Image: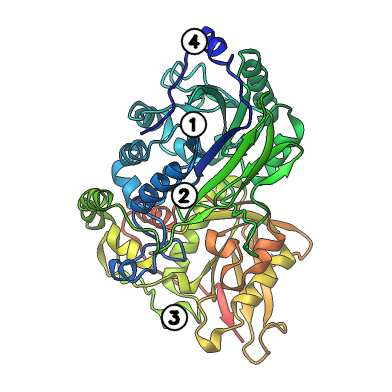
Amino acid sequence: MKTSRILMAASALAMSATGALADYSLTILHTNDFHARFEPISKYDSGCSSDDNTEGKCFGGTARLVTAVEAARARAENSILVSGGDQFQGTLFYTYYKGKLAAEMMNKLGYDAMTVGNHEFDDGPEVLRGFMDALDFPVVMSNADFSAEPLLAGKLQKSTVIDVNGTLVGLIGLTPQDTGDLASPGKNINFTDPSEAVQHQVDALTTAGVGIIIVLSHSGYLVDQEVAANTTGVDIIVGGHSNTYLSNTSDRAKGPYPTMVGDTAIVQAYAYGKFLGELNAIFDDAGNLISASGEPLIMDGTVVEDADTVARIAEAAAPLEEIRTKVVAASAAVIDGDRGSCRAVECQMGNLVADAMVARVANQGVTIAIQNGGGLRASIDAGEVTMGEVLTVLPFQNTLATMQLSGAGVIAALENGVSQVEDGGGRFPQVSGIRFTWDASIAPNEGRVVEVLVNDGGNWVPIDPDAIYGVVTNNYMRSGGDGYKIFASEGMNAYDYGPSLENVVADFMAAGGAYTPYTDGRISQK
């Protein structure tokens, strides 16, 4: 049972704050960027079969979180459960239920609060409001003026205060300052500087007698560090948005758990419910943080799934078959997505997917798409195209990822892409917005890519190694997958959490009538 309750009146805050906080311990349980992964996932963060789950090869899923949260609460003297945002988007569960199933599962888990992630605005304020109406706890977002948005004004809070066994804890929300570019919040919401917004709320909460202050931030690991450095009075920041894995034991971690900036402890627990963050904090009698320790808990096959939750998720999954059979587009001919084609030469499916990627983000100045051929898993028959067919081609729940990259970086990426053609490597690049020629007689990674052209006002001209280009790929490749380390190391202004690739392709096909598959010589071999 939850031990917290929302306190609304300032007088109640002041009266409740009179008790001493000597050596007060508080365990902060947290998740972020769950993205509708109610069912278990594979080590690649995509779907995991029931057979693999039975064999203990899967991770996450709400049923494991139910068990883990219950156990963590049992060993904690005082605890809260909070979310760093982005419950929305990522699987068919969101496509079908929007925020309804997320609200149901979060209520079941007993969350105390969450912040707004940018994906909570993917379907506008209407869906966010419906989600909030179904929750048993508050949603917070401080760095925006939403007073002109009637669906959120009076409902969404900048901060809130909860009473955890007699001790006041203030919770402040943050969302990305560029959410207007990342999602669909509408014209009535203006996003503001995160540090200024947090400090304003800290000052108000401190004046009201709140001694412990936690920021729930969907702003990314780097921004969280900036906020910690630029503000005073923040004890803990629970992060999200950058899907950052922090740990004291893993060499794959981006930093320690917690990461300390001054007196502020910053935590984040990767994404998709693969981990449950568990931070054990101790405060002195003035509410100052005097120690913080912990580690994200892996939700692997050793965590027993709660049987009731398994049954409920299975029930919720049943209608998804309707989506898989839904006709979303049409094709004038078979679209070749054969493995032998797409991992070696320009293929029709590669052109479709890469063209769809560029079209979706062209208004962001993106002109080049690179998609790994191994991410294309099937062909599509002529005639009606169902969402199930699209999902068969693109089964990995990848999202669009954008970045800026030098022309030299683009060339290096293509060089990696053609480095394993003889072995049928999945890294072979399917492209849009560029043309390139490669020479199989040259050894891998020794200059196989002999020419790269870009479109300049309708003319194809050599790529400029020193120029900067807008590039779109998928989040797997952007993080260095399939050998595309250049994307991770040199990609600038990167954003990995765009719309799902399967929806991008389905929308692209639906927009132009029956799709006619083609190749046009954009990839050639000497």
What is the spatial separation of the Cα atoms under label 2 and label 1, in whole angstroms?
Answer: 15 Å
Give the amino acid at mark 4: Ala
> In percent of the image, x 28 and y 66: which residue is there?
50
Circle 3 residues within 10 Å: few <14, some 14–19, many ≥20: some
Give the amino acid at mark 3: Ser
Q: Callout 1: helix, strand or loop?
A: loop
For label 1, the residue is 185
Q: Sequence order check: which comes first, mark 2 or mark 1?
A: 1
> In percent of the image, x 70 and y 26: which residue is there?
233
For label 4, the residue is 9
Residue 460, visible in the rendered structure:
no
Q: Position of 330 compared to 346: left or right?
A: left
What is the spatial separation of the Cα atoms under label 3 and label 2, in whole angstroms?
Answer: 26 Å
- Name the spot of residue 356 as percent of width and height, x first: 46, 57
Q: Callout 4: helix, strand or loop?
A: loop
**Which mark, residue 499?**
2
- Name the spot of residue 262 as percent of width and height, x first: 77, 38
Q: Callout 3: helix, strand or loop?
A: helix
Q: Sequence order check: which comes first, mark 3 or mark 2?
A: 3
Q: Callout 2: helix, strand or loop?
A: loop
What is the spatial separation of the Cα atoms under label 1 and label 3, in whole angstroms?
Answer: 41 Å
For label 3, the residue is 341
Q: Residue furthest right?
A: 466
What is the spatial separation of the Cα atoms under label 4 and label 3, in whole angstroms?
Answer: 66 Å
Circles 2 and 1, Cβ within 8 Å, touching? The answer is no
**Which mark, residue 403?**
none
